[in-house]
Every structure is written in structure tokens, then in C-alpha cells.
Image (tube, rainbow, N blue to C red):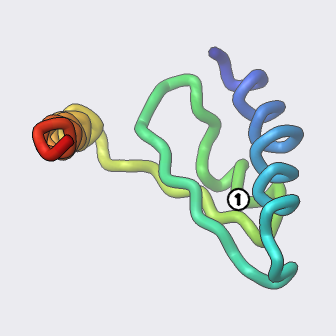
Amino acid sequence: MDRNVFIDWYKNVFIPSVKKRNLDPEEKFILILDNAPAHPSSTELNEIDPQFFVVYLAPNVTSLIQLMYQGVISHGNDAI
């Protein structure tokens, strides 16, 4: 993925999909992204639609979150 593909997805897939499912036209949304080099700046993305706010995780946090998520999945599988 590169920057242009991401912007295209954000504008033409993500935003319309969220708006289609939303019942309140005034509601605001947040998209939390990892710090991948292919992502455009949050400033650029936040200028696209005022209902949507993009924030990035701090560098090196993604691997910690993935480990926590794996723990949740393993405990969920144990319960089944």
C-alpha cells in the first residue's frame, strides 16, 4: 500500500461506509492507525471530512497492542 491508495480507500470506501451505517448525521468518528510509513499525515486526512478525526499510535506501540490482542484471543478460545 502507498499513500495514494490509502487516501483513495479513506475517501471512497471508509468514510462512505461509516456514514451509510450511521443514524446520526452530526456524529463524529475517530480512526486510530498505526504509524506505518505509507499513511499520510493526520493533518491531511483530518482536512478531508470534518466528521472524521484520525490519530496515530505512538511509534513502537503497535507490537505491544498486538501482543495484548493475542492474549485476549487465547483466553476467548479457552472459554469456548
The quadrant in which the C terminus is found is top left
Query: Where does the image place residue 8, in percent across and percent down from the top left?
Result: 83, 31
Q: In this view, does 38 lie above or below 43?
A: above
Say whether residue 48 is left or right of residue 2.
right
Above or below, comparing residue 73 to residue 26 in the picture: above
The kind of residue on which mark 1 rests is Asn
Image quadrant containing the N terminus: top right
Q: Say which residue label 1 marks.
A: 46
Q: Is residue 27 visible?
A: yes
Residue at point 42%, 36% (across, down): 35
Quick check: 72 left or right of 30?
left
Quadrant of the rendered structure where residue 69 is? top left
Of residue 27 and residue 22, the one placed in the foreground of this image is 22
Tally of numbered discs: 1
Q: For residue 60, say whether it is visible.
A: no
Point 71% across, 50% down: residue: 45
Q: How crowded is mark 1: few (under 14 residues within 10 Å), some or many (20 or more)?
A: some
| Image location of residue 31, percent across then percent down | 57, 55
Badge 1 element: helix
Instruction: Please name the residue shown 76% across and 41% down the image.
Output: 10
Residue 48: x and y in percent read 82, 55
Q: Position of residue 73 (x, y in %)?
A: 22, 39
Residue 7 quadrant: top right
Question: Looking at the picture, does residue 55 appear above or below residue 7?
Answer: below
Q: Is 1 placed above or below 26 here?
A: above
Q: Residue at x 76, y 22 (%)?
A: 5
